[in-house]
Image (tube, rainbow, N blue to C red):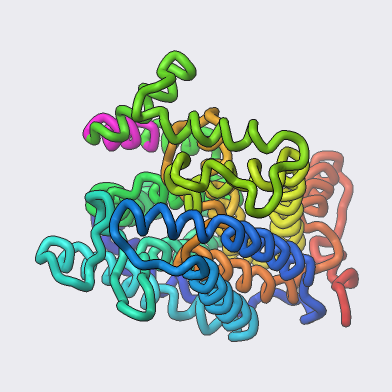
Amino acid sequence: MSTRVRSFSEMSSEAEFTDSSAARKHRPDYMIVLFMGLLMLIGLITIYAIGPQRANVLNSAYGYDYSGSYFFIKQVVSLVVALAGFFAVAFIPYNLLTKNAGKLLIIGIGSCVLLAIAGWAHLGIAQETLGATRWFNLGIFGSLQPAELLKFAMMVFLAGFLGSKYRKGMINDIEDTLIPLGILTGVALLFLVVIQKDFGTGVSLVGVILTMLIVAGINIKNLMRIGLLVFALGAVLIFTAPHRMDRIFTFLEGDNHSGASSSYQVEQAKIAIGTGGLFGLGIGGSVQSTGYLPEAINDSVFAIMGEIFGFAGLMVILALFTALMMRLLKIMDHLIDIRLKLLVAGTFGWFGSHVILNIASMIGIFPLTGITLPLLSFGGTSMVFIAAALGLVFQLSHYTVHTSKLKEAQYENIGSRRGIGRARNSSRGGFIRN
């Protein structure tokens, strides 16, 4: 028990780290900016195309008075804020962020506590939608989802914590590493899944943490234990919430459940994608966004893009996602410091989990999770923090080395087994220079 308490007391200090890499600063990877910008542009075009229909639907159903350009203007504002977040994190020295990771985590958890209290007290600042309180209502400034801040804070904090344990050879230590990590994750999931009823964001957070653990070198035995624990916890959270159970049963029954209200969104999403054909109906041609497909502007935007741009357009979008994620992997592979690698790994897990879960649910190969499609869905908070995470990776791409550290490590391992000596730092002459 004393060891466990000591581990918690050290977590904050272990999360603080400085630039210990020997790589010379060089040009960053501008392909990240290119792919991110193209995805944002496609998302903006889509919102421009379906925004008027969305406004008409809400005006008719709820008596709002939205103009036809309301959602487009809000998306432009969100993009401006997201780009500001990207460049702020890209150019503010990352040490400033990582040294204050503990404080950032406290702010993230504190914001979730504040939202829970405001929701229970029915204060106006807590925005309730469809029975869930997930946002702060900021009036003319829109809304803020603290879950995204918590996710970003967890990623930055755990990069320092797991990186420190890796350097000490303690990444698989149950009492000193895995139990504290499990408790911290449990606290985060308590707010995200139980209190805020946001199962999709909880799944995304688990994806971030698992990706970081795999990169940190957790062994198969412990990974299987964690996997079983996550599966059991997920089962409990699903079977204690009727709407989640309904989604699972609907998914398992597949097309046999056709016509039921619980399968309506997936059915309409498939109709949208199928109607788009090879090249789509074009801007202004969407029918499903006129009220047939729920959340057409948010979670279901991929299906609407299939209707507008067709199969060819969706392949372009998937290619951009794939290219961006491959750049993340390349940057991670060419970083020296394990803690910087973990920051990129967390961003990869975050981005990848959103892409996979959203698209898989829209085409019916995964249950609905209500998760946004990065950089494309309407909304500000998710886009801002994902852009900020990409900005952090963009900054870290300044410090990559020319030689793959993964390939070098594999070569050294093979060489050591064969009795061939090789200097561990022999690749230092291969740094990328300006």
Q: Is residue 250 above or below residue 199?
A: above
Please state the horizontal and vertical placement of residue 267, each as a whole percent of the image. 49, 29
Residue 120 visible somewhere in the drawing: yes
User: Picture quarter containing residue 42?
Assistant: bottom right
Q: Is residue 125 above or below residue 353?
A: below
Look at 52% across and 73% down and name the residue there: 73
Magenta-drawn stretch contains 234: yes
- Quick one: 154 or 150, which is closer to the camera? 150
Please state the horizontal and vertical placement of residue 421, each as a whole percent of the image. 87, 53
- Quick one: 378 or 275, which is closer to the camera? 275
Magenta-drawn stretch contains 49: no
Look at 81% across and 80% down and name the residue there: 26
Please state the horizontal and vertical placement of residue 317, each as a whole percent of the image. 71, 50
Residue 203 visible somewhere in the drawing: no
Look at 52% across and 69% down and name the residue there: 69
Q: Is residue 158 above or below residue 418?
A: below
The span picked out in magenta is 230-240
- Quick one: 113 or 50, which is closer to the camera? 50
Look at 15% across and 66% down and name the residue there: 117
383 on left or right of 291: right
By secondary structure, the bulk of the magenta-drawn segment is best described as helix
Residue farthest along the left direction in this orientation:
121
19 on left or right of 426: left
Q: Is residue 243 above or below residue 10?
A: above
